[in-house]
Amino acid sequence: MTRVLIVDDEPQLLRALRINLVARHYEVALAGDGGSALRQAAQFRPDLIVLDLGLPDIDGVEVVCGLRGWTSVPIVVLSGRAGSQDKIDALDAGADDYVTKPFDIEELLARIRAVTRRAAPHEAQPAQIRIGERTVDLAAKTVSGDVRLTPTEWRLLELLLRNPGRLISQRQMLTEVWGAGYAKETHYLRQYMAQLRRKLEPDPARPAHLITEPGMGYRFAP
Amino acid sequence: MTRVLIVDDEPQLLRALRINLVARHYEVALAGDGGSALRQAAQFRPDLIVLDLGLPDIDGVEVVCGLRGWTSVPIVVLSGRAGSQDKIDALDAGADDYVTKPFDIEELLARIRAVTRRAAPHEAQPAQIRIGERTVDLAAKTVSGDVRLTPTEWRLLELLLRNPGRLISQRQMLTEVWGAGYAKETHYLRQYMAQLRRKLEPDPARPAHLITEPGMGYRFAP
DNA sequence: CGGCGGCGTAGGGAAAGCGTCAAGATGCAG
DNA sequence: CTGCATCTTGACGCTTTCCCTACGCCGCCG
């Protein structure tokens, strides 16, 4: 869930934005002046800041500079001033976008989505899954301990690992890995499940994680 | 030096933008319609695209979608239409910013600086990478030991080195290095991977760092 | 006790994928 | 125009992977 800090000195604008953002499942914090904005940014750790330039205590550009001193969180500036120089100053201070009041709320939301999308890839996390002694990384397509899997083995393993604990029917595995028309070729499954167990299970003869459900299908037990 | 592709159907606007950008030490390419824009994007490899929505052949939003299919290069949209829905459509299609005509050239430049700054955070990471006996500097585009790489070789190597240990699919390599439409030309990969190994690997016949994953892609092993 | 269906293992032939050499385009500087 | 570097394209062995058949094991049921 994306966390947004809204900074503005007009309570009614704060309220309107909060309602719209909460309705779209953002987590929202509010600040009414530059001082509390800087404090909130450090405390609330937002993923995005919507910042009005016309604050009672500190100039908005100063707030941008203060934030950029220690964080690269995306900042969307709001302002009543439409002059080019104001925009240039704010953008060059480190803001990511500049919207002039009055603005359409839907446009602001679209701009928020745009800058959030651009900043998002930083929180990309590796999806690592443990199978016995081994660790599988589906994104990097790696298995710990110098184990290599073939393309078909990866497709099969991925299907199982993306549904931990759930039973996958033979029919589903065959159609998703080999394609429709192979729905009856159950011996492919035995073949490749055996290979996966040889490569991944501590004791391939007694599988602890790649479980057979006789007559039904297979299951990955974490 | 930042490379910018400008797309607009008005020659005079193209000229004005080119002059301003060249004066600020940008490298500039021009396109007059959507078709050549898509072609130029694949060929010129810009770091930023300034895109007019009102093109004679393809709708601007379509162009944005076509680009986003294979690249995440920043896109700043220009448009005469000031309606909110137009902005929302363009931004949600993948544009990074939206500027309505007429615009102040200085403001546009500031917005270009803003999106460029946001898209280029990887300059911070150390660009020196060891491959066997050689040292590769991605920023300076140099390899120790008087080894020279061609532009295509650099693009390919950069893609692999920026994802150490991670498998890069053939499809991804082909679309990112050669552009969409080359997704099936796996022959190029073998050709250029062989050249990279000849130039970088201690024993090109037994590659230790530029690894082949048969049927899937390639991987850089640090 | 003996057939039967589902499961695991082994091995071989076919096909697809890979590495390499070599030669034909293409573009650019002199 | 010529020469050079680079990018395409083609052809040929070699390896990996896939597909398929065969066989042994186990629990179930008649």
Image (cartoon, coloured by chain):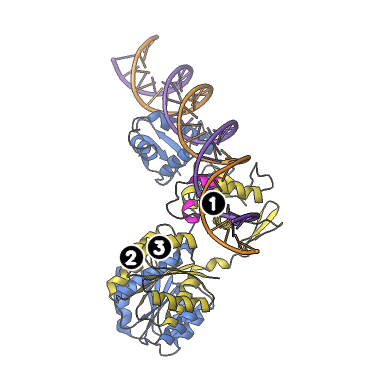
Chain colours: A blue, B yellow, C orange, D purple
The answer to whether residue B188 is magenta is yes
Instruction: Give x and y (percent) for residue A38.
Output: 47, 81
Q: Chain of mark 2?
A: B
Residue type at mark 1 is Arg
Residue A5, compared with residue A217, is above or below; it is below
For label 3, the residue is: B36
Q: Position of residue A96 (x, y in %)?
A: 44, 75
- N-term-proximal mark, 3 vs 2: 3
Mark 3 vs 1, N-terminal side = 3
Say which of marks 1 and 2 sits in front: 2
The residue at which mark 1 appears reads as B166
Is residue B148 in sight in this rendering?
yes
B153 left or right of A73 in image: right
Can you tell which quarter of the image residue A146 is in? top right
Q: Mark 2: which secondary structure?
A: helix
* Frontmost residue, A94 versus B31: B31
Q: CA distance from mark 3 to mark 1?
A: 34 Å
What residue lies at 57% left-to-right and 58% top-to-bottom? Answer: B151
Q: Quadrant of residue B37?
A: bottom left
Q: Position of residue C22 (x, y in %)?
A: 61, 40
Which residues make up the magenta segment?
B174-190
Q: Which mark is residue B61?
A: 2
Q: Tell me whether marks 3 and 2 sit on the same chain.
A: yes
Q: CA distance from mark 3 to mark 2?
A: 15 Å
Q: Residue at x 52, y 34 (%)?
A: A198
Q: Are marks 1 and 2 on the same chain?
A: yes
